[in-house]
């Protein structure tokens, strides 16, 4: 039986995400923090597929599905309509997309939204590959990760490119708020959503969402892996305001990246090679140094 | 005409995803619970309810048995038991 406590959520049970899905958790944390007076747009991707198995919906707020590339543009349109109707002070707009839909396919729509200054919070759920279509690499896939389009072998050690600095790219538009968060720290995530929604103008939030299927690990490890990514320095939680770095999530004693890598099947091909692990440790050390995480 | 394109809010509750559980399910011991609400906060299925200490419980109609509640519980008051064990 369902009691009234279940209906408190703006994102409800019965969606068809995998067990332990980081994105399902992140999406609920975001819309729960945003409150009832919110309109959400959603690019094509895992989130759209598992939350709206036709003819059902898991969303308890108005929600619209856009194409892969134009979640930010649809969000801009919704915001403009609210402004015209004189309701912009009462209703908040959230545009959502996955890492592929944001950093590759939807980047120009996102940049347009930020440049035009729409009062929209764009949330990028970063599970580090195109998980919905079968784990192809995106520009947010980390170095050396095994995906179906960057398979390791005799001449390759997985994804050859570094992660795109999306938070900085958005921050370079000199928007009021651009930040990264992680499902491993849910209170911090919700604080960032609330802070972003209290600010007028375009906002950007990138959320690290471990994916049991794509990263090859047991579903129960989602939070542990998310915390290790932050704790090792590989996923810095940072906040930019008007182009300036204002706050970082401190990690006084950084963990070795090996602890993070060895839990995941997508890094299985490199965990036994000291040389390859050292390359990833170098990325973490660079982050710690650059953002002064210590 | 648009009835098919517009879904009713929250209607996914018709999917009883609890049948997905294959090996383990969480058991809420309700002994050392301090009522922090972390399990309810991080459940990806949004299927844990409760307000005060020792009242939290999952809805097995939706629980997929991922085990995140057992991981986050600071008092180890939630344990994963085999699906075949008695309730």
Image (spheres, grey):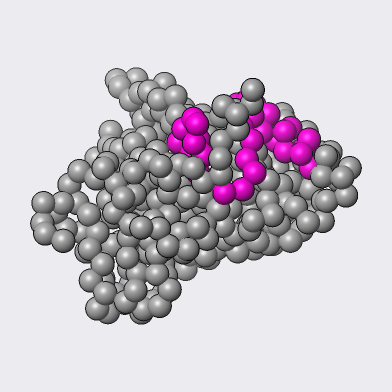
Magenta residues span A50-79
Residue nearest the observer in this picture, A53 or A282: A53
Return the x and y of residue A139 as percentages of the image width and height: 54, 31
Q: In this view, does B59 lie above or below A60?
A: below
Q: Residue at x 40, y 69 (%)?
A: B50
Return the x and y of residue A203 as percentages of the image width and height: 72, 49
Q: Which quadrant of the view contains residue B1?
A: top right
Q: Can residue A240 be seen in this view?
A: no
Q: Residue furthest left?
A: B85
Q: Which residue is drawn at 46% across and 64% down?
A: A5
Q: Can residue A223 be seen in this view?
A: yes
Q: Residue at x 62, y 40 (%)?
A: A63
Q: Please give left or right for residue A215 compared with residue A252 in the image.
A: left
Q: Is residue A193 above or below residue A105?
A: below
Return the x and y of residue A225 as percentages of the image width and height: 37, 51
Return the x and y of residue B84 as percentages of the image width and height: 11, 51
Q: Please give left or right for residue A139 compared with residue A117 in the image.
A: left
Q: In which quarter of the image is the N terminus of chain A?
A: bottom left
Q: Which quadrant of the view contains residue A146?
A: top left
Residue nearest the observer in this picture, A23 or A103: A23
Magenta stretch encompasses residue B41: no
Q: Please give left or right for residue A170 compared with residue A118 in the image.
A: left
Residue nearest the observer in this picture, A247 or B78: B78
């Amino acid at each position: 039986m369902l009691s009234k406590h279940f209906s408190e959520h703006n994102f409800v049970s019965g969606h068809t995400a995998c067990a332990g899905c980081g994105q399902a958790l992140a999406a609920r944390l975001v819309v729960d923090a945003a409150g009832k007076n919110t309109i959400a747009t959603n690019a094509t991707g895992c989130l759209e597929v598992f939350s709206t198995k036709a003819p059902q919906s898991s969303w308890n707020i108005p929600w619209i599905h856009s194409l892969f590339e134009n979640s930010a543009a649809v969000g801009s349109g919704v915001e403009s309509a609210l402004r015209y109707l004189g309701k912009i002070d009462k209703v908040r707009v959230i545009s959502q997309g996955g890492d592929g839909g944001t950093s590759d396919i939807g980047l120009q729509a996102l940049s347009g939204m930020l440049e035009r200054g729409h009062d929209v919070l764009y949330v990028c759920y970063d599970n580090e590959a195109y998980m919905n279509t079968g784990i192809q690499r995106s520009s947010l896939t980390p170095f050396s990760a095994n995906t179906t389009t960057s398979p390791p072998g005799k001449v390759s050690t997985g994804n050859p490119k570094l992660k795109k600095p999306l938070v900085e790219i958005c921050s370079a538009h000199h928007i009021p708020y651009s930040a990264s968060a992680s499902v491993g720290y849910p209170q911090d995530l919700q604080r960032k959503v609330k802070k972003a929604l209290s600010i007028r103008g375009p906002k950007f939030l990138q959320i690290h969402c471990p994916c049991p299927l794509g990263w090859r690990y047991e579903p129960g490890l989602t939070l542990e892996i998310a915390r290790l990514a932050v704790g090792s320095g590989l996923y810095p939680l940072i906040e930019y305001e008007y182009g300036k770095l204002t706050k970082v999530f401190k990690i006084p004693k950084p963990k070795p990246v090996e602890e993070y890598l060895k839990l995941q099947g997508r890094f299985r091909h490199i965990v036994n090679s000291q040389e390859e692990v050292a390359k990833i440790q170098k990325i973490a050390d660079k982050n710690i140094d650059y953002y002064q995480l210590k | 005409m648009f009835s098919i394109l517009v879904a009713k809010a929250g209607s996914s509750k018709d999917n009883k995803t609890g049948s997905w559980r294959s090996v383990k399910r969480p058991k809420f011991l309700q002994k050392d619970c301090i009522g922090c609400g972390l399990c309810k906060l991080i459940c990806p299925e949004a299927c844990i309810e409760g307000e005060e200490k020792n009242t939290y419980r999952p809805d097995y109609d939706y629980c997929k048995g991922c085990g995140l509640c057992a991981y986050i519980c600071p008092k180890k008051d939630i344990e994963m038991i085999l699906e075949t064990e008695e309730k």
